[in-house]
Amino acid sequence: MNFRSAVHAELPFLRRYSRTLMGNQALGDALVRETLEALIEAPDEFHAGLPVRQELYRWFSRIWRSSALRPIEMPGGVVAALPMECRQALLLTSVEGFSPSEAATILGLAEEEVVAQVRAARAAVNSMLTASILIIEDEPIIALHLKSIMTSLGHDVGAIVRTRSEAVQEARSAQPDLILADISLADGSSGIDAVTDILADHSAPVIYITAFPERLLTGERHEPTYLITKPFEPETVAATVWQALLVHRERAAQADSAA
């Protein structure tokens, strides 16, 4: 992949980061444009020794520090409640997937500073990310394991359902904040179809937890943002739930601020 293609492939993720950081789609996209314009003007300053994605975010951080654009403080925004340093460190590591060392390079900080900022940010937002959960899972042991993980994180599991029809009925009555869904359900129905029905009139992040990820990763339909393969580690589930709730609530806050 050439340099131009590599940068282009990362732009959706950089826009996501910028929009969440700025609390506004238009401001976030404007900051990304400033970054690209700076790259075009000085391509020789691009650090070839770093991965393209990491260097692109480093340039973004550099442009952000010199830009006149400033974030909108969104009522109800989880990330917006954080100091900017903690906000950047949290998003880079917990949403964009950079290691603390990589985030430190992007931000021009010591790794120890990034680790401390992430720890402080997580402590500050954990209480704001509690949610009501709907579990769609037909294997009782797995369902109870997921419920145990969720309750240990402070979430409320409203119901565990085993079929498509049960899932749709429960979602319509309970309006869950988050859905954990298997693909193959008890009566031969599909968790994919259940989620499609639910999302037709209800907005909530969905995490598929399945032993058959190939049924979702076909390239033939819109593929899920969050996918965990069975058998799973509790830490993986916890981290994915945290990320899904954070991103969804930030997007909702942005939408409210734009309305």
Image (cartoon, grey):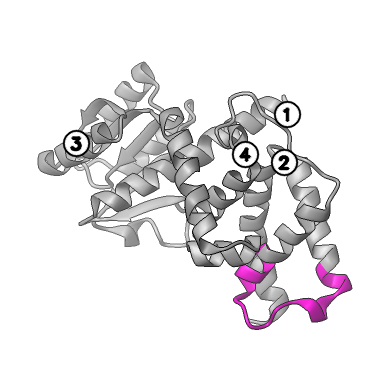
For disc 1, the marked residue is 258
Task: Return the residue at label 4.
Answer: 83
For mark 1, give the secondary structure.
helix
Classify residue 62 as left or right of residue 237.
right
Distance from disc 4 to disc 1, alpha carbons, whole Å, reads 22 Å
The residue at the point 69 percent across, 30 percent down is: 73
CB within 8 Å, label 4 to label 2: no
Give the label, 3 or 1, closer to the camera.
3
> Residue 170's spot in the image, x, y percent?
30, 22
In this image, 258 relative to 251: left or right?
A: right
Q: Quadrant of residue 87?
A: top right
Q: Secondary structure at mark 2?
A: helix
Q: Can residue 18 be seen in the rendering of this structure?
A: yes
Cβ atoms under marks 1 and 2 closer than 8 Å: yes
| Residue to which mark 3 is pinned | 148
Q: CA distance from mark 1 to mark 2?
A: 9 Å
